[in-house]
Image: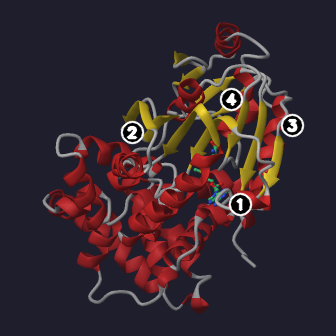
Amino acid sequence: MSRLPFNSLAYALREAARIDAAVFAGQSLADNLLGSVDPQARPAVQDLVYGSLRAFGRGDFFLSRLLERPLAVDEVRALLLVALYRLETRPEAVHTVVDQAVSAAGELLHGKFRGLVNGVLRSFLRQQEALTAALAADGLAVAQHPDWWLRQLQAAWPDDWQRIVAAGNQAPPMGLRVNRRRLARADYLARLAAIDIAATPVGEDGLALARPQAVDRLPGFFDGLVSVQDPGAQRAAEILAPAPGSRVLDACAAPGGKTAHLLERADLDLLALDLKPARCRRIEEALGRLQLSARVTAADCTRPERWWDGRPFDAVLADVPCTASGVVRRNPDAKWLRREADIASFAQAQKRILGALWPLLRPGGKLLYATCSVFPAENQMQIAAFAAAQPGVGIVHEEQLLPDAQHDGFFYCLLEKRA
Ligand SMILES: C[S@@+](CC[C@H](N)C(=O)[O-])C[C@H]1O[C@@H](n2cnc3c(N)ncnc32)[C@H](O)[C@@H]1O
């Protein structure tokens, strides 16, 4: 139980350090690690956690110069990384930040590391200029990605990898999807303008906000007028575009962003599956808020004998699990948690999903394969291998979105079943 006031920077630093340390120990931010933080302090803690994790390798570079030997205690190292991130990104009142970090250290291991935290942070401030110059000469620390990840990007995208890396290191933009069943995008844009929220149209239903906003500031959010969704993710419904009345399978559907978009655009007979029951509840919540309906079932899409009624689908969306290398700025813990071997494991699982779903499609039907990855083994290579091994696969459309200021990284391939 923390004795620090919830509204203090010390509390935010302490909580951010606790969460970062949990990530270093192998937990994912998706496990609701922020859930135990006092709600008042959550935005500040979230900023520190995401920012410090996004800065992969940067803080470690500084610590390698500031510490005589590596720190064995993960929570103290995490506290230093969080405090260094804060000192670098908000250079005002730096001595207060150091004092607050020392107070936070007072709650760790009976305060044993207060002196060390104080000393390291004060040395950093004294040497900041020289350390920053030294860092600028260290390609890996500047890139803020694991070295294997950089090698993969360099090999796949020799002309674009630096832009991909730069996008991955930025805070993500916020995109909205206007529920076209409820109102026109131009009308929603006018409602935003009336409360001074600047946005520009993107894609067919999307809006890019000039600055991220809390959802409770968005007019009609809780009534289902709008959803938060990256414009890149909105390409799925635009590309698959099933005709009204189609029988559609959304095979990996949770939390339901693409399911909802498909249903906003057309009346469909849609079955949404996800492996995990808790995640299926999130699909139901999203559909409930948007006043849409679909059959939602917790099931393994690779085991159709357990859930399929034998009637072929006109369209299938296979938004498969992947490394999420195209959305790393939204999930910066991935840089710490992923291993290079994960690419091959995901590719294997994706191959199994594609192979299991293809027979469920009617002749002439379309399957959209989607990932939020930029690694070719999960994308172009996966599809090329599938099309080579499976007779009757027609590639109708393929696109790779690389992450930039407008959208995240996604891969889409629309396949048609030829007779
Ligand atoms: C990329 S996410 C889907 C995102 C979702 N389409 C959206 O737009 O909100 C992949 C999902 O696939 C689910 N999944 C993984 N393996 C599965 C399987 N064998 N059968 C069904 N769902 C699976 C995961 O639980 C995860 O929710």
Judge: label 1 CB < 8 Å from ligand 1.
Answer: yes
On the image, numbered disc 3 is attached to which residue? 288
On the image, numbered disc 4 is attached to which residue? 262
Please name the residue shown 40% across and 47% down the image: 383
For marks 4 and 1, the one nearer the N-term is: 4
On the image, numbered disc 2 is attached to which residue? 403
Tell me, for residue 275, which label it has, or none. 1
Judge: label 3 CB < 8 Å from ligand 1.
Answer: no
Judge: label 2 CB < 8 Å from ligand 1.
Answer: no
Q: Nearer the viewer, residue 145 or 362?
A: 362
For marks 3 and 1, the one nearer the N-term is: 1
Disc 3 to disc 4, C-alpha distance: 15 Å
Disc 2 to disc 3, C-alpha distance: 31 Å
State which mark lies toward you, 1 or 2. Answer: 1
Residue 173: image x %, image y %? 50, 35
Q: Secondary structure at mark 1?
A: loop
For marks 3 and 4, the one nearer the N-term is: 4
Number of callouts in the render?
4
Tell me, for residue 162, which label it has, or none. none
Quarter-of-image position of residue 244: top right
Q: Is residue 404 visible?
A: no
Disc 3 to disc 1, C-alpha distance: 20 Å
For marks 1 and 2, the one nearer the N-term is: 1
Asked if disc 2 and disc 3 are in contact, CB closer than 8 Å, the reply is no
- Tag 3: amino acid: Gly
- Tag 4: amino acid: Leu
Q: Nearer the viewer, residue 107 or 33?
A: 33
Q: Secondary structure at mark 4?
A: helix
Q: Secondary structure at mark 2?
A: loop
Q: Is residue 332 visible?
A: yes
